[in-house]
Amino acid sequence: MIKVLTIAGSDSSGGAGMQADLKTFAAMRVYGLSVVTAVTAQNTVEVTGFHAIPAEFVGRQIDTVLKDIEVNAVKTGMLSNTAIIKTVCEHLQSYSIKNIIVDPVMVATSGDLLMNERIDRILWAFRNVLLPICRVVTPNIPEAEILTGREIRCIDDVKAAAIELQSLGVPNVVIKGGHLEEEEAIDVLFDGNDFFEYRDTRIDTRNTHGTGCTFAAALTAGLAKGLTIHEAVGVAKQFVRKALELGFPIGRGKGPTNHFAELYRLADAAAAKEK
Ligand code: PXL
């Protein structure tokens, strides 16, 4: 059995954060473990507040699961302060994990901040502590702008930011292009040697809550299964496309995506055949 661990925040509306991760893992047939770093109070419109879990207790959760269960990959999501970032790094390093995927979450889909410390300090920890130990980092455009201090308007800007992030010691950089003003949705992978562009038509939907988490979780599951980084990005992009196509129009804001879209489609097709 392939096992993956998410170290992330809880989203009370169920569409993003660790809920998105666990649903994605289940849909991709990998077993998901979850260490919670923060509890958010949020719906499809806004984040009304969050409580960070004390760093020491985040570390305890990591040790408790990892001393019992060996995992094939670890994904990090919401890490709202430097104490948590440092603790996560220290604890992961003592378990020599090959696949660490960092989704540098900073802002929720609603636009609300998911950090409770000065951003320059958090940036320092991301750039100097967490990125050097991971295999892949998956910022969206606003996160890549914050991490590099560069304005990103076009694909050339994306590539320059990817080179800069890679120079911090992370072998693979995937910049999620959903926020770019391009006709297509273009994700860019830089593997240290070459750039790979993953292009797809855009899906017209407002149910995008949790898209970033879902992409990174699907990428994590793919790498845990032994796919190459190039294959895993392709699989993650397809997974998000299907989840967006059948997203749930619930709540008054941006509804969640449907992590089980493909499984529901297959089950419906099988049921129709039996009739
Ligand atoms: O999508 C980023 C994200 C990560 N983690 C938590 C979130 C969100 C977005 O809403 O709620 C807990």
Image (cartoon, rainbow, N blue to C red):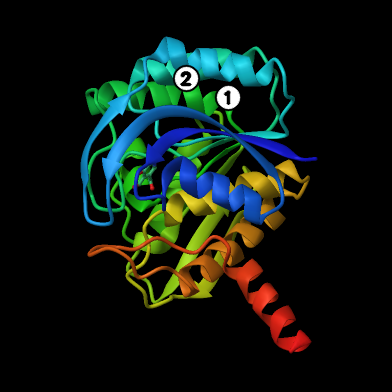
Q: Which mark is residue 254?
A: none
Neighbor class of circle 2 (other Cα within 10 Å; few <14, some 14-19, many 20+) is some
Q: Is residue 211 left or right of residue 274?
A: left
The residue carrying pointer 1 sits among few (fewer than 14), some (14 to 19) or many (20 or more) residues within 10 Å by Cα, namely: many
Image spot of residue 194 (x, y percent):
63, 52
Indicate the quadrant where residue 6 lies: top right
Q: Are marks 1 and 2 in contact (CB under 8 Å)?
A: yes
Q: Quadrant of residue 100?
A: top right
Residue at 32%, 24% in the rendered image? 52
Across and down, in percent, residue 64 comes to 61, 15
270 and 75: which one is in front?
270
Q: Secondary structure at mark 1?
A: helix
Which residue is depicted at the point 32% across and 39% down? 106
The one nearer the camera, 14 or 162, is 14
Q: Quadrant of the C terminus?
A: bottom right
Residue at horizontal 48 percent and vertical 65 percent from the top:
186
Residue bearing the label numbered 1: 133
Camera-side residue of 268 and 33: 268
Tell me where residue 83 appears, x and y as whole percent. 37, 14
The kind of residue on which mark 2 rests is Val
**Figure check: 89 above or below 119:** above
Q: Is residue 6 visible?
A: yes
Is 273 on the left-hand or right-hand side of 13? right
Image quarter where ligand 1 lies: top left
Q: Is residue 51 above or below residue 218?
A: above
Residue at 25 percent across and 53 percent down: it is 110
Q: What is the three-letter code of the residue carrying label 1?
A: Ile
Q: Is residue 60 above or below residue 121?
A: above
| Residue that carries the numbered disc 2 in the rendered image | 129
| Residue at disc 2, secondary structure | helix
**Residue 174 visible here:** no
CA–CA distance between discs 1 and 2?
A: 7 Å
